[in-house]
Amino acid sequence: MKLAFREFGSGTPLIILHGLFGQSDNWNTLAKSFSEQGFKVYTVDLRNHGLSPHSEEWSYPIMAEDLKAFIKEHGLEQPVVLGHSMGGKVLLFLEYLYPGSASKLIVADIAARFYPPHHQKVIKALNAVNFDEITSRKEAEAVLLNYIDDFGTRQFLLKNIYWKASDRMDWRFNLQVITHQIENIGVEVPLFRSNTPALVMLGEASDYINENDISDFKNRFSTLQLVRIANAGHWLHAEKPKEFFEAVMDFIKA
């Protein structure tokens, strides 16, 4: 599958992967900042998200295969790879299935362990938006408000609305497949051991990574750095972009 992507700058290749319900342009501002530091940045839409093709196949192994194919297609020699949440777990599967594909890995606020399904409220909200009746983002937000209190989360999801045809809106992500296969993004990454330098970043206020997860990362990676971003939750790159950028740059340039 050929993944949609955006590219910025020139120099050392850096690939950035978004999380669940995200898309490449969520990373535009940080991508431009990285590109100004001598990196050619690729922000990629994972399958069933953004402008990439929709598919009934949706799992970490297949997304890792997509990423491996992307690296080969663009002739990238050992790129630096960065992924947030679901995107971070794709990188862990990349290292498990295709070890050494990247020169450095940056995993943002996700662990290798199993996560039970916990997106049910969001999925229920998204499926409640009936585009046969709704013709504006304002109307869609009114529906989401019945399920999702957080303003930022609603705005993040609403960025995925587009005009599918001249008279109908829709979600860019493949909501049907995500709804029925949501358990696929909670699976555990099989144990592996790697010499690839890795940076694990976590929001201090997030519960996605615990002390057991940190021990697991230390067991998997012989060269591991850990950075906690103060006063940040799961969306650490959006909440604290300056601190996030500086931590990534310190790791990459070390």
Image (spheres, rainbow, N blue to C red):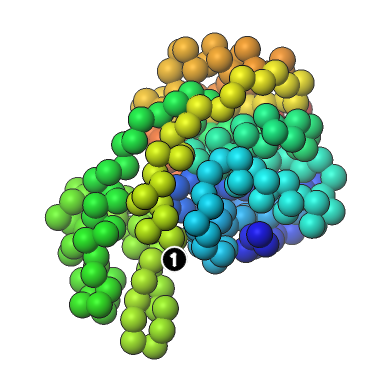
- Quarter of the rendering containing residue 102: top right
* 159 left or right of 139 in image: right
Q: Residue furthest left?
A: 146
Q: Is residue 68 above or below residue 96?
A: below
Camera-nearest residue between 231 and 151? 151
**What residue lies at 56% left-to-right and 41% top-to-bottom?**
60
Q: Is residue 101 above or below residue 113?
A: below
- Quarter of the rendering containing residue 79: top right
Q: Residue furthest bottom?
A: 166
* 117 left or right of 246 in image: left
Q: Is residue 124 above or below residue 128?
A: above
* 54 left or right of 137 in image: right
Residue 93 % position (x, y): 62, 34
Write down the residue under mark 1. Answer: 172
Callout 1 secondary element: loop
Residue 75 % position (x, y): 84, 54
Camera-nearest residue between 210 and 122? 122
Graded by Cα atoms within 10 Å as few (under 14), some (14 to 19) or many (20 or more), the crowding at tag 1 reads many
**What residue lies at 68% left-to-right and 55% top-to-bottom?**
42
Determine if residue 29 is in view. Answer: no
Question: What amino acid type is highlighted by mark number 1?
Answer: Arg
**What residue lies at 74% left-to-right and 59% top-to-bottom?**
9
Quadrant where the image shows the N terminus:
bottom right
Residue 105 % position (x, y): 68, 33
Residue 225 % position (x, y): 64, 21
Quadrant where the image shows the C terminus:
top right
Count of all numbered marks drawn on residues in the image: 1
**What residue lies at 75% left-to-right and 26% top-to-bottom?**
196
- Quarter of the rendering containing residue 83: top right
